[in-house]
Image: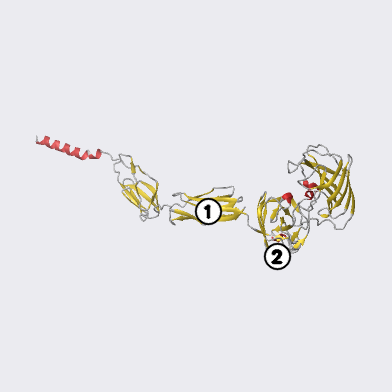
Amino acid sequence: MKKAFCFGLLAATIVLIVSPSCKKEKQVTSIKLSETTKIIVVGGEFALTATVEPVDATNRDVVWSSDKSSVATVDKGKVRGIAVGEATITVTTKDGGKSARCKVTVQAKKKPVTGVKLSETTKTIRVGEEFTLTPTIEPDDATDKTVSWTSDKPTIATVIDGKVKGVAVGEANITVTTKDGNKTAVCKVTVDVEVDKAALLDGVAYMEDKIEGVLYPYQIELVTPESAVNDKGKFIAAGIYHRFTISSTKPVNVTDKPAFGDYIVQSGNAPMTLLTKNYISYVRKINANGKFEGQAEAITAGTLTIADKKIVFDGATAKGKIKIEYNGDYKVINKGLWRYEPRTQEVKTETFSAGSIMSYGSDDDDLPSQILHLSANGDKKMLLVKFFIAKDATVFTPGTYQVEATYGKQAVGTIQKSPGEIGALLWLMSSCLIYHDGKYPTTIYFFDKGTAVVTDKDIKFIVNSHFGSTLNITYTGELTFKKNQVLSGKEKYSVPLKP
């Protein structure tokens, strides 16, 4: 009995010793974190969750650490931002030393934008000119200082990253807007033409004779830039030529300056008017040799201000605004509309065998006539004549035409009396015999009175010029015309006038 008891006790002891060693431990194979990167602000917190694999690992204990505890701390997965910077949070398993990391970026606490200001609130620039607007975000330490730019009229002024460029004359509002808070500031931009300094050619010319009923006309010739001419009025660089013709008050002497004040573009030719009809005031490009280039641009609007030692024009052509200014003294030259015609009476006999006659409508549809423009060209000589025939006529009717018509009162069967040198182009002078050197006129005889006899073969003119010279002219060129033909190639028979 005693022997049996001892055997049982021994068996139980063996079981107690052997059984625990039969239970196998599961080791950790890896670990993952719920975040691998994270951005927080100073004082901000977030929790990292560690996932140990396998899920039934025997020892799932982990250890947390931060490589920069001055930037971010960690306690049982809870991360807290301490200062601006970057820190790496690491979790490591006790079993096997497996690890995972999260890169934490700590930023300053967000400061919202409270306002924005611009370096300019109003600005005037020229077309093509640029300037830069600088925004000031409030407060200075606002977190997000991102802004966007807009122009309410990009056809007037454009803006890219604060750089503003004038595109065309006008006004535009440039607006800056903050991304944070949608705060705005506006700069009103005026795109204009600045005053260009001008040089005065020769002096102010008193046009002794009438211009279409104007009793006291003066003509002023300005050139920009002022460096385009020397002190003798000679062109030394390319520039822009400006001619202004004004109606002033009666001077005591023909060398007196015109009345001081504003001369305004308006209908009629009353005193203190800037005259623009028939290109009498115009702008044109000119090269360093003094030769006109391109077409003349008629003055369409504006004011010419004349003072004792200053002349200013603020106005426009159809192509844009103009602001020019001459500063300095000036004299008055008694120039006259007939500067090219000799004062002595002469007899001129000329024949033209080549030319053309062009028909074009009147400026006034109520007038009974249409205009025939005769252009004839010879060796350094030209003939320009403006006839008036019935509006519905399709042929150039033979007969006798009197030189007597004034524009606006022309009668059928007449020739327009020459108004003298009224514009940029010789064809505007209506009726004249011209001699030139191939570049500029040397002599012009302006039709004043007389007749032209038209046959089916030729036209014979017996005319007196403005100063009484006798002109015996025979034209044997083309006599047919096309009704309502557009007057094209005006320059074809034109020699530019000397500035």
Q: Is residue 479 visible?
A: yes
**Residue 472 image point, x, y percent:** 89, 49
Task: Please name the amino acid that badge 2 sits on.
Answer: Asp
The residue sitting at the left extreme is 1
- Residue 226: give x, y in percent of width and height: 70, 60
Q: Which mark is residue 431?
A: none
* Label 1 sits on residue: 187
| Label 2 secondary element | loop
Could you tell me which secondary element the residue under label 1 belongs to?
A: strand
| Quadrant of the rendering where the C terminus is positioned | bottom right
Is the residue 1 above or below the residue 112 in the image? above
Residue 117 as seen in the image, left or right of residue 232: left
Q: Which colour scheme is used?
A: secondary structure
Say which of 203 and 182 sits in front.
203
Residue density around tag 1, few if under 14, some if 14–19, many if 20 or more, within 10 Å: some
Q: Which of 149 and 186 is in front in this view?
A: 186
Q: In the image, residue 463 lies at what x, y percent? A: 87, 49
Q: On residue 329, which mark appears?
A: 2
Instruction: Identify residue type, mark 1.
Output: Cys
From what the image shows, is residue 452 above or below residue 83?
Answer: above
Distance from the alpha carbon under mark 2 to that under mark 1: 40 Å
Q: Mark yes or no: residue 423 visible.
A: no
The location of residue 188, given as percent across then percent down, is 54, 53
> Where's the N terminus, which quadrant?
top left
Camera-side residue of 281 and 94: 281
Q: Which of marks 2 and 1 is in front?
A: 2
Query: How many discs mark residues in the rendered view?
Result: 2
For label 2, count other residues whose C-alpha is less than 10 Å away and answer few (under 14), some (14-19) or many (20+): few
| First of labels 2, 1 by sequence position | 1
Lateral position of residue 122 relative to residue 229, left or right: left
